[in-house]
Image (spheres, rainbow, N blue to C red):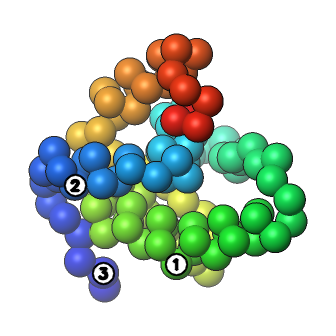
Amino acid sequence: MKSVVVNLSFDETLDALAHVQRRKLLVGLLDHNPQNDTPVVIADSADEATSLERLVKMHHVHLPKLEEYGLIVWNEDKHEVSKGKNFDEIKPLLELLATHEDELPPDWL
C-alpha cells in the first residue's frame, strides 16, 4: 500500500497544483459524479509525440504525486481516477481557479 500524506501543508498544496496537467485533472474532478460513467477528459490539441510524452508523465509523475498527497485514488488496472480523502482540502482553491478561469492566463487551466 502506498503512503498517503494525511494533512497537506500549504507547500504540498502548491506543489500538487504546480503543473498544468495536475491542475486540469483536479479541476476536472470538481464536477465529476462517480455515479456517472462519463470519464473526465482533458482536452489536448498537441501533436501525437507531445501527447504521448504527456501521457507518460501523467502515468509516471503526476498521478503518483497526486495519489501520494491523497488527492486522488488511482486504479492503474482500470485506468480510473477518483477523488481521494484529501480532495476536500484543496476544493476551495480549485473552485476559485475554475470560477476565474477566464481571467487567468491560458496555460493555467
| Residue with the mark numbered 2 | 12
**Picture coordinates of residue 6 (x, y %)?**
15, 60
* Residue 80 x/y as whole percent: 60, 64
Q: Earlier in the sequence, mark 2 or mark 1?
A: 2
Q: Which residue is mark 1?
A: 60
Q: Amino acid at mark 1?
A: His
Going by the numbered disc 2, the residue's amino acid type is Glu
Task: Please give the name of the residue rendered at 23% of the width and 77% of the height, measured from the top-left corner.
Answer: 3
Compared to 60, does 58 lie above or below? above
Q: Please report the residue visible at 48 percent of the width from the left and 44 percent of the height from the top.
A: 23
Q: Is residue 11 left or right of residue 70?
A: left
Residue 68 position within the rendered picture, expressed as x and y whole percent measured from the top left: 31, 69
Q: Quadrant of residue 66?
A: bottom left
Secondary structure under the numbered disc 3 in the rendered image:
loop
Few, some or many C-alpha atoms within 10 Å of disc 1 (few <14, some 14-19, many ≥20)?
few
Q: What's the CA distance linking mark 2 and mark 1?
A: 18 Å
